[in-house]
Image (cartoon, helix red, strand yellow):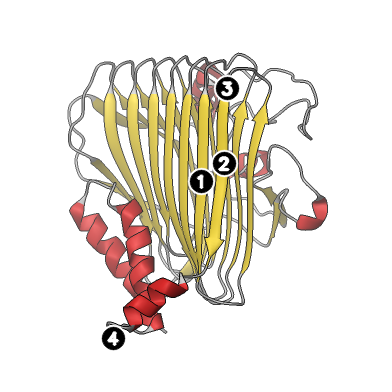
Amino acid sequence: MAQTTKTMQVGRIPSLTWNKLKVNYSLLEGDFSVTADVATAFEGLPEGISERALTGEEAEAFLSAHAPEEKQEAVIAGKEPIYHPQAFGTGLGKEVDDFVRASAKSVSLFEVAEGAKIDTPILWDMHFEDGARAVTSQIIHVGENASLTLVMTSDSEKMASGVSLISTRVVLERGAQLHLAKTQMLGRGFLSMDDLGAALKDGAALTLTQLELGAEKTYVGTQAELVGKASRLAVNMGYLVTRRENAWINVNAVQRGKKTDVKMHFDGVLDGTAQKNFCGTIDFRKGSKGSKGNEQENVLLLSDDIVNKTLPVILCEEEDVEGRHGASIGRLDEDMLFYMAARGIDEKTAEQMMVRARLRAVASAIPVRSLRDRIRDFIEEAFEA
């Protein structure tokens, strides 16, 4: 059912900071009434994979049965007693989640059978028409000891505008492995929201490769809960924010099981009068003994008029854990520019070479050559007038 909202809180971070920084959350204002469906296309589903539509009630029942247990916790380091007011937590939060439930006509349940080993990547393409305001919701359920690479793309025409909201929940059973690749190449007038929540059981592994390259305003949220012993999360994200564009990124890794492992790497490029807010949180919960978490963001600045906010966070309720975070932010190295100039390469060309190299390093993990070519072309066109 279509719905209109004037204000929606997006991407509330798990541990509040000094409010003057304006990074605790974002407020979206406007008309988000849903006016269109999303054109979705699969390039064939092999044996061992099924996809069907669920009603909202069926989806809620499924998620309730598979949701990580949310326990009442003590107030520490600015956290609230209830860490996430959702039955199945996501990175963009409750108000976005409520809007999706009220707006999506159905929820797609994509399931991989127990023990199925799918060697060929599955492509899930979503095309958004100019002027569309569309919501799509899916649950990805990978059975015990099954494995899959799923590549999800969202795109539109280059100069198109509209609203895109993609809500994805992932449930990985014991020993399941999923490589989820998400690529956003929407038009320059789009508002893009990508909301992800994941639950990982014993020995499960989620690899998330994500490229946010288009849209005028981008909101990305991920919350992965490593509830199982020896579960693993690897995030490799690249983003490009140019002209007067705005990006808000909130990624939370919640480590609950023993000997869990988290590695998160973010590569960003900002140009023009771009604005970007990033919060990456490693959250060691009670019971996560022997766990490790590592987070790094590298940001390349190509203009003097950029607003860049980076907030790496480690929260800890357990002993015998190992956490690390860091950020590298700056312009191109002067020695490198001098080296290139000596070989006839001007500063603008050198910058574009570094942008290509940085984002293609993320794209190289996507095992679909035709999509990597599209990504290359999109990056090239992003710097055209």
Give the quarter of the figure containing the N terminus: top right
- Dot placed on the residue nearer the N-terminal end, 4 or 3: 3
Amino acid at pointer 4? Gly
x%, y% of residue 206? 39, 31
Amino acid at pointer 3? Val
Q: Nearer the viewer, residue 150 or 238?
A: 238
- As measured in the structure, the alpha-carbon distance from the residue carrying label 4 to the one carrying label 3 is 50 Å
- As measured in the structure, the alpha-carbon distance from the residue carrying label 1 to the one carrying label 4 is 33 Å
Q: Secondary structure at mark 2?
A: strand
- Dot placed on the residue nearer the N-terminal end, 2 or 1: 1
Q: Characterize the local packing of mark 4: few (<14), some (14-19) or many (20 or more) Cα atoms within 10 angstroms.
A: few
The label nearer to you, 4 versus 2, is: 4
- As measured in the structure, the alpha-carbon distance from the residue carrying label 2 to the one carrying label 1 is 6 Å
Instruction: Provide the residue designation for mark 2.
Output: 325
Disc 2 vs disc 1: Cβ atoms closer than 8 Å?
A: yes
Q: Secondary structure at mark 1?
A: strand
Q: Quadrant of residue 233?
A: top left
Instruction: Provide the residue designation for mark 1.
Output: 296
14 left or right of 358?
right
Query: Which residue is at a point 38% across and 35% down the rendered structure image?
Result: 207
Does residue 122 appear anywhere in the picture? yes
Q: Quadrant of residue 21?
A: bottom right
- 85 relative to 229, above or below: below
Residue 321 numbered mark, or none: 3
Q: Characterize the local packing of mark 3: few (<14), some (14-19) or many (20 or more) Cα atoms within 10 angstroms.
A: some
Disc 1 vs disc 4: Cβ atoms closer than 8 Å?
A: no
- As measured in the structure, the alpha-carbon distance from the residue carrying label 4 to the one carrying label 2 is 38 Å
- As measured in the structure, the alpha-carbon distance from the residue carrying label 3 to the one carrying label 1 is 18 Å
x%, y% of residue 103? 57, 45
Q: Secondary structure at mark 4?
A: loop
x%, y% of residue 263? 45, 36
